[in-house]
């Protein structure tokens, strides 16, 4: 009984750690938000109301400016479903290929999808993708997972921005709080549901999310926006783009401040502010060579609440504090077309992250370089291969005695190679793709991730595919190096501890998938995918050991356990996403996803509390329905319905809610939109005790063509 109690305690503690380590910046409006009971700053509201009024006045007085993106946007709206399904994606194979010829469960969110969603962040946009489980943990934290294994770490999903990995080796996850992309600059978001380790390597277990920004060639002119709401208090951005002697370029700056979500105890700790600036250049050096250079810098403050154990005197205190975050990246990508059927690409980037809060801090510098060569061999073999290296030294900053990572300095080095051959068995009808990734990491040495995919296109607008793939989630510092203690009893002094384990091995997945997509009529498209995943060596904790510790004083009893690979099992499920263009002015989109996990504790072959936490932290059912109305006089109305199943492990009930966006293109260079989110109820839980509130948000955008 005591053993079960401590397992539950450790699971709750681990859940808290996901909140604590994921946190980042607090808003500059924190004092205003804390002083206002409803989280609304009157000063901020007046500022933005005045700015919006000024924009409207200027637009009505002088509406003659041309909108540089109006023609592009209108052309996109007129695309047929067949044209949209012909969009090329790169995430599945690192080379452009049509969706019809992609043997994977792939979804593409276009700029039009992003704009009309009314979303202000990448996680909000991802709610539209089938199989992607998105939940807001607090104002500044998200759980984003694909096909199950829901948690605040997103540890089974590889996230990329223009091919740059934002997966952190500290705790095997994504700092969603600093992945702040200017949404107007995003060309598309490609989501691969299912393992992508054959191409992308470790940690692409349940899926890959690749955020791809526009070429600088397509962002000439000035683009400025300002927005405000009761939760999203301020969000302002400006971008300028032009060209000079064959060099296309743009630069941008943006910032936002967000108030805390609802807390029943009125302890509003999770305000969020971030400022960011960046640039991108694209140039065609000659007929065969292109070069892209881009970079970003950010800085912010994010509120967080952490539980900190103290040894002398023995205590466990809830501390509200601020994480200071900053960082940046610099990326270069050179591509050469060697012939009509062969090309070479080299990409290198540097990424720096820094965060310091009341519980921990880290400084990390990452250097990454990849070479990719693609060619066609004997007309039937399309080969892509590559090599890569990553060096990621980090320094852990200890701020409290009860949490430590040893050693404080560690280099996370990865060397990799991959090869993939797409074999045309029947020309333009049947393809077999074989490949594997070979990767060496500092924790487990060499890992191999092979895959095989079969694709059949009986007609030009019909695809059937099947795949079997192996993927791994390699250990991180939280698995091997963390020492975390919490108070169990003050009298007598008793602490529990999760201690390091240098015998942790990689979590593995063997995934079986199949899918079907078809343009049923010129106005109706459907995509279906099913899967069966076999997991092994998932993280859990071992038996408790008891010892007496005298330092630091006073002496105390310590209950210790170590992370181990103690869970195995399977998951089954599928997704369906129909799209119906009912009329030229109405588009109806829907998604439905189902996943069921059946796991067990390997040593006992039973359902322990930790196994239950895996199974009950992901919803069985997800559904969305969205209608896009393109109305006369420049109006748009875009309601979205969402259903999310229950999360028993987190005491979260199933819920239904809706978002709605009303847009108005009221002058040639002005757009005004008002978005309501979570409209069905005043507030609801999504991933824990914090309640997500109903909110409203207004934004005005001004665009002017380059001279």
Image (cartoon, helix red, strand yellow):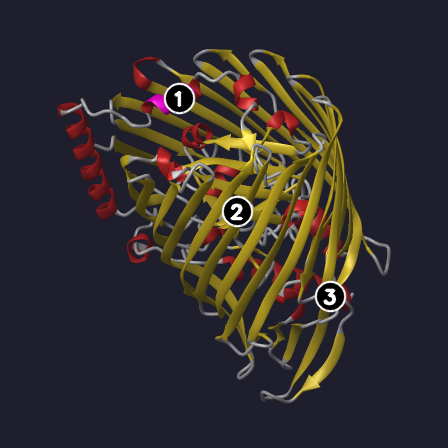
Label 2, on which residue?
163
Could you tell which of marks 2 and 1 lies nearer the N-terminus? 2
Label 3, on which residue?
504
Query: Disc number at residue 7?
Result: none
Q: Which residue: 30% across, 54% down?
A: 29
Q: Is residue 275 magenta?
A: no
Measured in 3D between alpha carbons, the distance from the residue under mark 1 to the one under mark 3, in whole angstroms, is 51 Å
Could you tell which of marks 2 and 3 lies nearer the N-terminus? 2
Percent x, y of residue 516: 70, 24
Image side of residue 508 versus residue 83, left or right = right
* Secondary structure beneath label 1: strand
Q: Quadrant of the C terminus?
A: top left
In this view of the protein, can residue 684 be seen by the observer?
no
Q: Quadrant of the N terminus?
A: bottom right
Q: Are marks 2 and 1 in contact (CB under 8 Å)?
A: no
Q: Are marks 1 and 3 in contact (CB under 8 Å)?
A: no
Measured in 3D between alpha carbons, the distance from the residue under mark 2 to the one under mark 1, in whole angstroms, is 34 Å
Percent x, y of residue 370: 56, 53
Q: With respect to residue 500, does 300 lie above or below?
A: above
Within 10 Å of disc 3 (Cα), the crowding (few <14, some 14-19, many 20+) is many
Instruction: Report the magenta residues as a range.
Output: 71-75
Measured in 3D between alpha carbons, the distance from the residue under mark 2 to the one under mark 3, in whole angstroms, is 29 Å
> Quick one: 196 or 611, which is closer to the camera?
196
Q: Which residue: 56% across, 81% down?
A: 311
Q: Are marks 2 and 3 in contact (CB under 8 Å)?
A: no
Percent x, y of residue 366: 51, 62
Query: Disc number at residue 637?
Result: 1
In this view of the protein, can residue 482 be seen by the observer?
yes
Q: With respect to residue 489, does 675 lie above or below?
A: above
């Amino acid at each position: 009984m005591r053993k079960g109690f401590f397992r539950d305690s450790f699971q709750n503690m681990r859940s808290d750690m996901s909140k604590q380590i994921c946190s980042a910046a607090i808003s500059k409006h924190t004092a205003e938000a804390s002083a206002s009971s409803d989280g609304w700053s009157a000063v901020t509201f007046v500022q933005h109301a005045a700015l919006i009024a000024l924009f409207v006045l200027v637009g009505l007085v002088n509406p003659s400016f041309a909108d540089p993106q109006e023609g592009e946007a209108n052309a996109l709206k007129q695309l047929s479903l067949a044209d949209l399904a012909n969009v090329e994606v790169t995430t599945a194979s690192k080379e452009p290929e049509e969706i019809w010829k992609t043997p994977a469960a792939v979804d593409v969110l276009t700029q039009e999808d992003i704009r009309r969603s009314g979303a202000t962040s990448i996680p909000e946009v991802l709610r539209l993708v089938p199989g992607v489980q998105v939940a807001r943990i607090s104002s500044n934290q998200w759980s984003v997972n694909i096909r199950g294994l829901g948690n605040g770490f997103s540890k089974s999903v590889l996230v990329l921005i223009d091919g740059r990995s934002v997966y952190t080796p500290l705790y095997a996850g994504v700092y969603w709080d600093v992945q702040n992309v200017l949404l107007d600059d995003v060309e598309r978001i490609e989501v691969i549901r299912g393992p992508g380790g054959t191409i992308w390597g470790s940690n692409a277990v349940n899926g890959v999310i690749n955020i791809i920004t526009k070429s600088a060639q397509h962002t000439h002119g000035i683009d400025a926006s300002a927005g405000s709401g009761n939760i999203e208090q301020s969000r302002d951005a400006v971008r300028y783009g032009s060209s000079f002697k064959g060099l296309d370029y743009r630069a941008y700056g943006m910032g936002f401040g967000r108030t805390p979500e609802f807390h029943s105890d009125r302890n509003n700790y999770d305000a969020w502010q971030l400022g960011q600036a960046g640039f991108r250049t694209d140039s065609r050096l000659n007929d065969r060579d292109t070069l892209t250079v881009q970079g970003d810098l950010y800085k912010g403050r994010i509120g967080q609440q952490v539980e900190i154990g103290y040894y002398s005197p023995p205590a466990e205190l809830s501390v509200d504090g601020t994480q200071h975050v900053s960082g940046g990246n610099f990326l270069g990508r050179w591509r050469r077309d060697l012939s009509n059927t062969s090309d070479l690409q080299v990409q290198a980037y540097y990424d720096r992250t820094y965060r310091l809060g009341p519980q921990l801090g880290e400084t990390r510098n990452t250097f990454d370089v990849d070479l990719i060569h693609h060619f066609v061999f004997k007309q039937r073999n399309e080969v892509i291969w590559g090599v890569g290296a990553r060096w990621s030294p980090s320094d852990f900053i200890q701020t409290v005695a009860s949490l430590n990572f040893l050693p404080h300095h560690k280099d996370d080095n990865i060397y990799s190679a991959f090869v993939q051959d797409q074999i045309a068995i029947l020309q333009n009808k049947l393809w077999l793709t074989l490949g594997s990734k070979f990767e060496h990491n500092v924790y487990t040495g060499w890992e191999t991730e092979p895959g095989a995919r079969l694709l059949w296109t009986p007609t030009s607008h019909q695809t059937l595919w099947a795949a079997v793939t192996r993927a791994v989630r390699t250990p991180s510092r939280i698995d091997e190096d963390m020492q975390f203690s919490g108070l169990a009893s003050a009298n007598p002094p008793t602490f529990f501890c999760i201690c390091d384990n240098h015998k942790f091995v990689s979590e593995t997945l063997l995934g079986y998938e199949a899918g079907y997509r078809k343009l049923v009529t010129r106005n109706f498209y459907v995509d279906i995918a099913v899967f069966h995943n076999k997991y092994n060596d998932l993280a859990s904790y071992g038996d408790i050991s008891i010892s007496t510790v005298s330092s630091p004083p006073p002496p105390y009893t310590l209950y210790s356990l170590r992370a181990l690979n103690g869970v195995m099992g399977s998951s089954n499920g599928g997704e369906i996403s129909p799209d119906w263009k009912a009329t030229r002015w109405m588009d109806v989109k829907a998604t439905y996803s189902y996943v069921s996990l059946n796991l067990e504790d390997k040593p006992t072959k039973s359902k322990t509390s930790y196994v239950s936490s895996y199974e009950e932290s992901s919803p069985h059912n997800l559904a969305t329905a969205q209608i896009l109305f393109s109305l006369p006089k420049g109006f748009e109305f875009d309601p979205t319905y969402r259903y999310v199943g229950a999360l028993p492990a987190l005491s979260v009930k199933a819920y239904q809610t809706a978002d709605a966006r009303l847009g108005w293109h009221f002058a040639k260079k002005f757009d005004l939109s008002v978005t309501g989110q979570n409209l069905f109820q005043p507030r609801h839980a999504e991933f824990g005790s914090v309640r997500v509130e109903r909110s409203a948000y207004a934004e005005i955008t001004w665009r002017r063509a380059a001279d």
